[in-house]
Image: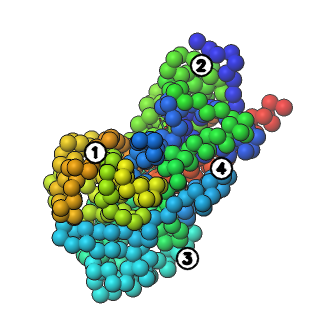
Amino acid sequence: MSDPHREVQVVIVGGGLGGLSTALRLCEAGTPALVLEAEPHVGGRARTLQVGGEPVDRGFQSLFTAYPATKRMLRDIGIGARDLVPFDRGAVVHDGTRWSRMGTSPRGTLGFEWFGPGDVARLARLGAEVAGAPANALLNGDERDLETGEYLAGMGFSDGAVEGFFRPLFGVITADRELRSDAGYFRFLMKMLLRGRAVVPVAGHGMIAAWAAARVEQLGGEVRCGARVAEIVPDPDDRGRAVGVRTADGVVIRADCVVVATEAPATRALLADLDRLTARALDLQPRGVTTLVYSLTSSFHSGRTIILNAAPLTSATPRIDLVCQESNLLRPGMGEGARLLATCVHGDGSAPDPDAVAAEMVRLVDTWNPGFPWARVATLEDVVVHPWAQFAVPPGVRDDLPDTATGLENVFLAGDVTLHPSVEGAVASGERAATVAGQHLARHASVGR
Ligand SMILES: Cc1cc2nc3c(=O)[nH]c(=O)nc-3n(C[C@H](O)[C@H](O)[C@H](O)COP(=O)(O)OP(=O)(O)OC[C@H]3O[C@@H](n4cnc5c(N)ncnc54)[C@H](O)[C@@H]3O)c2cc1C
């Protein structure tokens, strides 16, 4: 079935931050784009639930205000500093026996019990190095050939600094407790952490996608939810290009170019029969995140902070890596009806059993805050499993990710899978895809003249 009214210049598959960033930049440049999103809401992995009418992220996330492309996008869709609630600097850490408070700046770490002699000076040196280097130079520097753990050992950090500071914090940020992510990416994240604040938008992370979609529509684009793309339709006369996409309900939307901005497995499936090389490059290792969302009738912890689990790593599962009463940021003062997120990071196909996570939460509460009447005050509202929260980036993986171009001359890629597994990776990829798609359209317009 072909829809005679649906002929567009650019169709974008996926309404996550990568697809919306592409659409925003194209629309700003005067090319109205159509975004097709399979789910009923935009935002993809950065969506927000409503629990009891209040926002709760579908998995704990924090945004670094220093992310360069994200900063531009927030500015251009009208999200300002007043809409971003900062976390307290640092985090609270529990190792199974004691509490400590970590700072995330070299000065903030003075007195942090886990640091051995020389660690503060090492952190100051690392901080100065990353502060002075452009973000792209950090991502592409020689350190990307080392795992983060190896790199930290090479800098001379003590075991205490790794176990009490870097592993609990970066294990959650990168969903990689083993610290195998490449050290170029680690140094980039370290710069983001030191140069700005970690924040949550006041209506949850989903606010970014919602406002971006609204801006796209103001600029003449269209964002359609509940529209799953089943296939990219090749040109019957030239399989090196596409004529558009076919949606799951069989409608063909013709387009001069197609931008695919979906998560790796979906992109791989869409390209499998058309561009095997690119599809193969998307054979990445998923890093999963499972989150239990609780409502509490009295507060478990105060402050705009996260609690990190620094207990020694064992093979026992499940392990809760982070706890955050997100309502302390989004709805301060909401003692009754507070919302708490408990997050486990895990690998490929190993999502923990939610009942076992709930039992582990009871055990942690008992260890962390004996006597807290968890069973009486906590109600489990939801379990959110993201098998593909991020993808693993051990050394070499980022070098081999597909670029914006594919083997089809008018099909382009966006999304974190083309850069690095973060909000910034997604948003920056969209800027890049919009430029390349715009150049393609301009070339073809001038050939046609
Ligand atoms: C729990 C969790 C915590 C995270 N924490 C952080 C953090 O603290 N900081 C950070 O920077 N990053 C974090 N991330 C990563 C970050 O959220 C992602 O990297 C980013 O949102 C990816 O955006 P994207 O647009 O590339 O992909 P997605 O958000 O996955 O968007 C892809 C979209 O494509 C749609 N789609 C798929 N197939 C089709 C189809 N056939 N047709 C139409 N639409 C389709 C999907 O429904 C989805 O909406 C976290 C992720 C998770 C899940």
Q: Which residue is located at x 64 percent, y 16 percent?
A: 3
Check the picture and name the quadrant holding the C terminus.
Answer: top right
Q: Amino acid at mark 1?
A: Thr
Q: Is residue 426 above or below residue 275?
A: below
Q: Amino acid at mark 4?
A: Ile
Q: Amino acid at mark 3?
A: Gly
Gap in angstroms between the C-alphas marked 4 and 1: 36 Å
Q: CA distance from mark 3 to mark 1?
A: 47 Å
Label 1 or label 2, whichever comes before in sequence order? 2
Q: Which one is in front in this view, the residue at disc 4 or the one at disc 1?
A: 1
Say above or below: 2 vs 94: above
Say which element carries label 4.
Answer: helix
Residue at which label 4 appears = 77
Q: Residue at x 62, y 49 (%)?
A: 432
- Give the Cα separation between the discs numbered 4 and 2: 31 Å
Q: Residues within 10 Å of mark 4 (few under 14, many from 20)?
A: some
- Name the image quarter holding the N terminus: top right
Residue denoted by label 1: 379
**SS for dot 1:** strand
From the image, tell me which residue sits under label 2: 252
